[in-house]
Image (tube, rainbow, N blue to C red):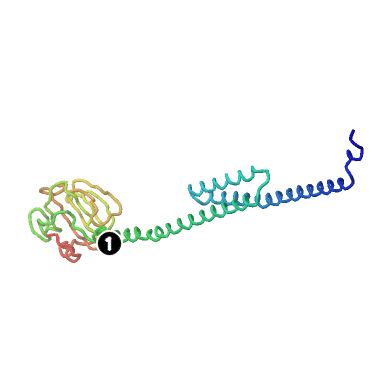
Amino acid sequence: MVPEAAARPTRAELRVAAREQSRAQRRDAAKAATRTALLRVALPSVAALGVAAAAAISVQGEADQQRAQAAGRLSEEAAAASGPASQESAAQAAQAAQQALAAGDAAQASRGDARQPLSGAQGTPDTATQAVAAEAPKPPERPKVSLPVTQAGLGEVFGAAGTHWAKRHTGIDFPVDGGSQVLAVTDGTIRTLWNPSYGYMSILRMADGTEAWYCHLRSYKIRKGTVKAGDVIAFVGNSGNSTGPHLHFEIRPAGGGAPVDPLPWFLAQGVDPR
């Protein structure tokens, strides 16, 4: 039989056991405080990585998205580790975040450098286009005075005598084929009429009141309206008092009166119908 004094712990043993229990409780409390501090350091870093990843996705291209996804996976792994985290793990996570951000900044800077030559080269096509435009031939200017037909050469001239006219020839004749185009000799307005002697007529009134008469026509292209020099207004014919297809052309000064010789009028305008 064991003596009663040997079975019960002494006061000294109780005090030792109490001190050991108190030390254990303090150690547990210190460990818990350390875990809390480490989580507080790591979790804001995780949030910062998430924000940086979102900004990188919105600004950068496909390569930046991959880096942001990698940073997001690191954040998820850090958040999932709800157990104790060591100071070394937190430092590694912070270092990985800094490297990811530095890589993104370097990629963005390299893209900015690559864009500079492109922006500088944009002026080259513009300069080339301007040079081509400057060398391109300009369209010919519209003549101020044109022949009444496309083929020069005169038949009967002004003032000629003959049995075909009551007195003398009042204009000049262009011996061209029937159906040939008749052109406006200058800018003006057109009106048309019929005359037993002149046949179908087109009359071009110029800005100063001078009139050009086109006679013995076959048909009209423009019966009334504004025309420019060189516009087709009618077609050569043989109507009225005519012995064959030709264009009889007269110039009548502003204010009416007798016709004048069209040849000096043409020559004064720099056009020779002969």
Of 213 and 127, which appears nearest the observer? 127
Q: Left of 71 or right of it: where is 180? A: left
Q: Of residues 103 and 242, which is closer to you in this image?
A: 103
Disc 1 marks a residue whose amino acid type is Gly
Image quarter hosting the N terminus: top right
Tell me where residue 41 appears, x and y as whole percent: 67, 52
| Residue 126 rendering spot, x and y as whole percentages | 35, 59
* Residue 249: quarter of image: bottom left
Image side of residue 33 versus residue 239, left or right: right
Extreme-right residue of the structure: 4
The residue drawn where x is 19% and y is 51% is 182
Residue at image mark 1: 209
> Label 1: few (<14), some or many (≥20) within 10 Å?
some
Q: Is residue 254 above or below residue 94?
A: below
> The C terminus lies in which quarter of the figure?
bottom left
User: Whole-percent x and y of residue 128?
Assistant: 31, 59
Secondary structure at numbered mark 1: loop
**At x 18% / y 61%, what residue is drawn?**
259
Q: How many marks?
A: 1
Residue 136 vertical position relative to residue 234 in the rendered view, above or below: below
Left or right: residue 173 versus residue 40 is: left
- Identify which residue is drawn at 20% across, 50% down: 195
| Image spot of residue 202 (x, y percent) | 23, 52
Farthest left residue in view? 162
Q: Residue furthest bottom?
A: 268
